[in-house]
Image (spheres, helix red, strand yellow):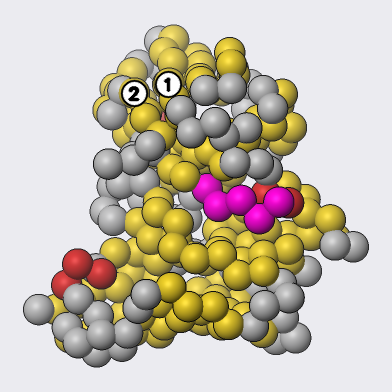
Amino acid sequence: SQQGEEDPQALSIQEGENATMNCSYKTSINNLQWYRQNSGRGLVHLILIRSNEREKHSGRLRVTLDTSKKSSSLLITASRAADTASYFCATDESAGGTSYGKLTFGQGTILTVHP
Amino acid sequence: DTEVTQTPKHLVMGMTNKKSLKCEQHMGHRAMYWYKQKAKKPPELMFVYSYEKLSINESVPSRFSPECPNSSLLNLHLHALQPEDSALYLCASSQDTYGNNSPLHFGNGTRLTVT
């Protein structure tokens, strides 16, 4: 399996519900980032969490990081139809605390929020 | 709208053609990247430029040739491509390279079709 695997691959919810996406990775990291991509467009950075942080919030987004389990989760609260997009986690892999200088993206979760 | 501008938005080229993709940012970012994204897949890193020097080449075939004329511009020269090279090509920039916890800013990409 690959660095940055996400689960579920697809998630369909109703407006107002919460959406949770999970990301697992294999190596040591400097940070983990979440991005959003609307169909056929570029990616938009949502949030960055450093390896020494456990939780971070930004508006309706909450990200957790568990380096012992090599996993992260993205929670979107009170979802809206406009949140419909693909969501990717991305890891800045490191060794001995030094970044490799590469950001590797997970397979992504396709989120559909029904009005 | 994105602060990273990519041109053209769409490109159709034959296998014997030579074409170039262009990317421009005016945010004063010192790192720039090319990613390739196939349908329903995550972006895959191709090249990284740091302070106008090529720092990472992910074993990309020589038919793809990057160029960074200055800190604001990034080109990708294409020659003798194959149909399997058809994809969305994404340019991104960051204030500094990954090791300094800099998120990526993406353009909306060039949709390339090789016939």
Residue situated in front as seen by the camera: A22 or A60: A60
In terms of sequence position, does the residue under pointer 1 or pointer 2 come before the other? 2
> Residue A74, how many percent across, how many down?
46, 78
Horizontal arrangement in the rendering, residue B97 relative to residue B69 (left or right)? right
Q: Residue at x 59, y 41 (%)?
A: B95
Horizontal arrangement in the rendering, residue A33 relative to residue B42 (left or right)? right
Q: Is residue B14 visible?
A: yes
Q: Residue at x 57, y 42 (%)?
A: B94
Q: Residue at x 19, y 87 (%)?
A: A16
* Helix, strand or loop at mark 2: strand
Dot 2 alpha-carbon crowd within 10 angstroms: few under 14, some 14 to 19, many 20 or more: some
Q: Is residue A1 above or below residue B65?
A: below
Residues tagged by mark 1 and mark 2 found on one chain of the structure: yes
Q: Which residue carries the number 1 mark?
A: B21
Quarter of the figure that contains the C terminus of chain B: top left
Q: Can you tell which quarter of the image residue B29 is in?
A: top right
Tell me which segment is drawn in magenta: B100-104
> Residue B86, how many percent across, how many down?
39, 34
> Residue A32, how many percent across, how many down?
61, 66
> Residue B59, how many percent across, how many down?
69, 35
* Parent chain of label 2: B
The answer to whether mark 1 and mark 2 are in CB contact below 8 A is: yes
Residue situated in front as seen by the camera: A32 or B10: A32
Residue situated in front as seen by the camera: B105 or B54: B105
| Residue type marked 1 | Leu
Q: Is residue A46 above or below residue A19?
A: above
Horizontal arrangement in the rendering, residue A102 relative to residue B94 (left or right)? right
| Residue type marked 2 | Thr
- Using the image, tell me which numbered label, if any, was put on residue B7: 2
Q: Is residue B91 above or below residue A33?
A: above
